[in-house]
Image (spheres, grey):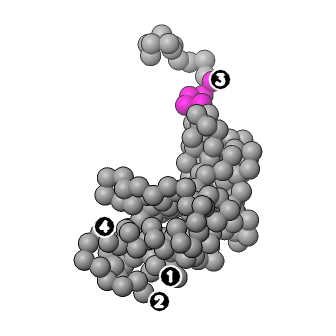
Amino acid sequence: MPAPAFATRTDRDQLVIDSLTSSFGESVVSCQRITDMLVITVKKPVIHDVLKHCKEQLDFNFMTTMCGMHDADRDMLGLVFHLQSMRQGHRIRLKTETPMKDPVFPTFTDLWPTANWMEREAFDFFGLHFTGHPNLKRILNMEDFPAFPLRKDYPLEDQTREDKDDSYFGR
């Protein structure tokens, strides 16, 4: 069922907030506007249901982006989704997080087949696992690569190099 047309982005944002808070209650952690986009943070156990609700009930039929994130200060990993309703011309951002020791989410390929490659990228660079994914393997790094390069704990330089002089870089 497509969402009704509204005149302003604020009205559409409020419709999304009302729908998610009435359907998922306390699992909606926060709703705020950051620059030009509504950002909604939800708890991990409901993320798949929230995305399904957004797609089927609120007409967010296009997932623009899904990517990983790492909050090193709190030792947390997370996912960020950008969803768009092509009919309404409306975009939102959904976020969720998980402790580093439990980097597992359900796959979202059942909602958007394009999530396949995005999940593989999040697995490859952040170490996030997606249960039910059809082919979860590294997408850009070597299969035997021992680390996850977009985590903030990954060293920026090769520590085994002997051919450089760190004094030139203020170290």
CA gap, disc 3 and disc 1: 53 Å
Question: Can the viewer see residue 140?
Answer: no
Residue identifier under label 1: 57
In percent of the image, x 74 and y 50: which residue is there?
Answer: 102
Mark 3 vs mark 1, foreground winner is: 1
First in sequence: mark 1 vs mark 2? 2
CA gap, disc 2 and disc 3: 58 Å
First in sequence: mark 2 vs mark 3? 2
Three-letter amino acid code at the position of disc 4: Thr
Q: Is residue 32 left or right of residue 127?
A: left
User: Where does the magenta region start and end?
Assistant: 154-159
Relative to 161, does residue 149 appear above or below in the rendering? below
Residue identifier under label 4: 10
Relative to 101, does residue 3 appear above or below in the rendering? below
Three-letter amino acid code at the position of disc 3: Thr
In percent of the image, x 56 and y 52: which residue is there?
Answer: 68
Q: Residues within 10 Å of mark 2 (few under 14, many from 20)?
A: few
Residue identifier under label 3: 160
The magenta stretch spans residue 17: no
First in sequence: mark 3 vs mark 1? 1
Q: Nearer the viewer, residue 44 or 83?
A: 44
The magenta stretch spans residue 156: yes
Specify the label residue 45 is tagged with: none
Three-letter amino acid code at the position of disc 1: Gln
Relative to 105, does residue 18 appear above or below in the rendering? below
Q: Position of residue 140 (x, y in %)?
A: 59, 53
Q: Position of residue 163 (x, y in %)?
A: 56, 18
